[in-house]
């Protein structure tokens, strides 16, 4: 199953949701989508305008691949869940800020799989379905939890 999540933004992300809905129909792909507040309502995929956080995490867990708009909260959820995902960032007029700039920066640093056009996204998804060729993002190990624990232990009254 593919999980499409564009966040809860009140404008939605119809530039992605509408063609993706048709793509899933044509290619007989099972998908669940969180579509936000856009005008387009999918005809061929199961969707909700908004999932609560628990359901959102469950959809991530059940999915083989996630397509996301590139919000940092979702990226963290996907990395923590050790999931394969493709980022399709919003443009400035779609979000009040240009996600493409920050995603391009992360793409270089973290080797994210990013698509900037619907056609490239569709090609990448079809290749994934055949080869499963998208890398999982792994963050370096951190000792921050031990640092916090030691701080609390040494500074407790």
Image (spheres, rainbow, N blue to C red):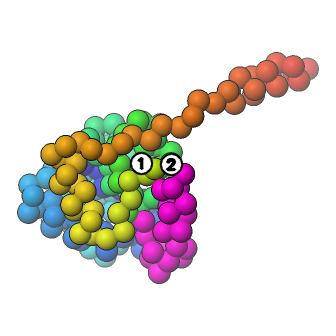
Question: Label 1 crowding class (10 Å Cα cut-off): few <14, some 14-19, many 20+?
Answer: few
Q: Quadrant of residue 83?
A: top left
Which of these two is toward me, 132 or 146?
A: 132
Residue found 55% across the figure and 73% down from its top: 97
Q: Is the magenta stretch mostly helix, strand or loop?
A: helix
Question: Label 2 crowding class (10 Å Cα cut-off): few <14, some 14-19, many 20+?
Answer: few
Which of these two is toward me, 37 or 89?
A: 89
Residue found 39% across the figure and 59% down from its top: 114
Q: What label sits on residue 154 in the rendered view?
A: none
Q: What label sits on residue 52 in the rendered view?
A: 1
Quadrant in which the C terminus is drawn: top right
Which residue lies most toward the right here?
A: 157
Residue 112 at what x, y percent from top left?
43, 52
Residue 25 at what x, y percent from top left?
10, 61
**Among numbered discs 1 and 2, the one appearing first in the sequence:** 1
Q: Is residue 121 left or right of residue 145?
A: left
Is 151 rendered above or below residue 82? above
Q: What stretch is highlighted in magenta?
A: 89-109
Quadrant in which the N terminus is drawn: top left
- Give how far apart the Cα atoms at labels 1 and 2 are: 28 Å
Is 138 rendered above or below residue 157? below
Asked whether residue 73 is drawn in magenta, I would say: no
Circle 2 — which element? helix
Residue found 31% across the figure and 71% down from its top: 117
Q: Quadrant of residue 116?
A: bottom left
Residue found 45% across the figure and 58% down from its top: 70
Q: What label sits on residue 110 in the rendered view?
A: 2
From where the camera sits, is residue 31 visible?
A: no
Q: Quadrant of residue 135?
A: top left
Asked whether residue 98 is drawn in magenta, I would say: yes
Circle 1 — which element? loop
């Amino acid at each position: 199953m593919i999980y499409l999540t564009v966040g809860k933004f009140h404008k939605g992300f119809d530039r992605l949701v509408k063609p993706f809905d048709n793509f899933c129909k044509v290619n007989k792909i099972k998908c669940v989508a969180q579509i936000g507040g856009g005008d387009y309502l999918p005809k061929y995929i199961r969707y909700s305008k908004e999932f609560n956080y628990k359901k959102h995490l469950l959809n991530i867990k059940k999915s083989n691949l996630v397509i996301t708009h590139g919000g940092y909260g979702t990226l963290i959820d996907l990395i923590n869940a050790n999931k394969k995902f493709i980022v399709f960032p919003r443009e400035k007029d779609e979000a009040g800020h240009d996600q493409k700039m920050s995603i391009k920066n992360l793409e270089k640093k973290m080797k994210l799989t990013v698509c900037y056009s619907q056609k490239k996204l569709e090609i990448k998804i079809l290749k994934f379905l055949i080869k499963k060729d998208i890398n999982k993002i792994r963050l370096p190990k951190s000792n921050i939890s031990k640092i916090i624990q030691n701080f609390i232990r040494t500074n407790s009254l």
